[in-house]
Structures are given as structure tokens and as C-alpha cells.
Amino acid sequence: KEKTLAIIKPDGLLGNHTDDIKKAILEYGFSILKEKTIQLDEDAVTRFYAEHSSKNFFSSLMKYMTSGPVVVMILEKENAIADWRALMGPTDASKAKSTHPHSIRAMCGLDIQRNCVHGSDSLTSAQREMSFFFRELSAV
Ligand code: ATP
Ligand code: MG
């Protein structure tokens, strides 16, 4: 089965959405293979979001992602990468509320930045992100 990396971002944790998000994950048929709660520092965010380092929103993204702990999880299911992105909903949580009302970002997110959750966007990203957070799985 396919695996993907999911993150409950600081707004998800601070807003007490963790239990609802995990419930949705399990109801959707994912298994949670690994899970840990960590505080990201600037170095980790720079490396994790390297593709966005030159974007105008990067300093704001940095502040947001280091504002509190995050929950990182490895999810497994057939078609896990696409299905987790579908369950999350679109990046802009304010739009998700009208277009994807049952998505997690509609439930818990606030706007284009504070959107509560992350999901790998490809097989390559999933491999990179899983080994980034779970070193022992670098060969998976
Ligand atoms: P993620 O990678 O977190 O799963 P995504 O793939 O839907 O989200 P990306 O385009 O990869 O979106 O952006 C990464 C994150 O950067 C977004 O989830 C959001 O928190 C933040 N972000 C994206 N675009 C903007 C923007 N225009 N202004 C502010 N923050 C943004
Ligand atoms: Mg992304």
C-alpha cells in the first residue's frame, strides 16, 4: 500500500483539532503507521519547505510553522498521497469552506496560510518527507 506524510500544523494543534483530524483520517480508511509531536525550528522549516524559500510569503510561513508544535504522521492506504490531499481540501482554507465543505481545511483552517494540515504532493515528495521526519524509514 502507498504511504504519505501528513502534518497537523501549529494552528491545528493550538485550536485543539487533533482528535477530529485523526478521527477523519481513520474514518477515511488510512492507517497511522507512525506519529510524533515535535517543535520545528528555523533550520527544519528551511529544509522542509526549500521549494518555497524564495516566495514572498516565506518569512510569514516560517513564523507560522515555528509558532508551536506540530504532529507528523505517516499514513498508509491504497492511493494514500492523492486521497490525503483530497481529504485535506484546497490550500486556501477560506475557499475550501464553500467549495469543499467536508474537507479538513474547511473544518479547521482559516486562510491560505493557516490551513491546518500538510500532505505530500507526489511519490518523490512523500519519500523525501517521510525520511526527513523518520530517519529510520529512509529506505522505505
Ligand atoms: P502543504 O505543502 O503545506 O501541504 P499545499 O501543497 O496545499 O500545502 P503549497 O503551495 O505547497 O501548498 O504551500 C505550502 C504552504 O505555504 C501552504 O500550505 C500554506 O501554509 C503556505 N502558503 C502557500 N501559499 C501561500 C500564500 N500565498 N500566502 C501565505 N502562505 C501561503
Ligand atoms: Mg505543498
Image (tube, grey):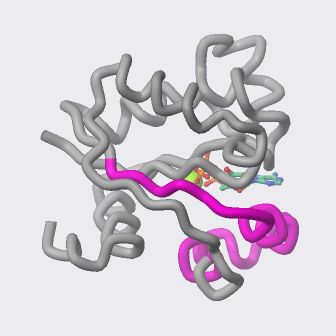
Left or right of 38 on screen, residue 32: left
Q: Which quadrant of the figure shows ligand 2?
A: bottom right
At x 75% / y 31%, what residue is drawn?
Answer: 93
- Residue 83 versus residue 11: which sits nearer the camera? 11
Q: Where is residue 138, by image quadrant?
A: bottom left
The percent coordinates of residue 56 (x first, y second) are 86, 68
Q: Please determine whether, in this image, residue 12 is positioned above or below residue 137.
A: above
At x 67% / y 69%, what residue is drawn?
Answer: 52
Q: How many marks?
A: 0
Is residue 30 located in the magenta-colored stretch of the structure? no
- Residue 117 versus residue 14: which sits nearer the camera? 14
Q: Where is residue 79, by image quadrant?
A: top left
Q: Please determine whether, in this image, residue 32 is positioned above or below residue 126.
A: above
The percent coordinates of residue 73 (x first, y second) are 40, 52
Q: Please determine whether, in this image, residue 94 is positioned above or below residue 35.
A: above
Is residue 57 located in the magenta-colored stretch of the structure? yes
The percent coordinates of residue 64 (x first, y second) are 80, 62
At x 19% / y 43%, what residue is drawn?
Answer: 2
> In which quadrant will I find the N terminus?
top left
At x 71% / y 22%, what residue is drawn?
Answer: 106
Left or right of 59 on screen, residue 119: left
- Residue 134 versus residue 14: which sits nearer the camera? 14
Left or right of 87 on screen, residue 74: left
> In which quadrant will I find the C terminus?
bottom left
Kindly give the residue lying farthest to the bottom in the view shown: 43
- Residue 40 versus residue 103: which sits nearer the camera? 40
The stretch in magenta equals: 45-74
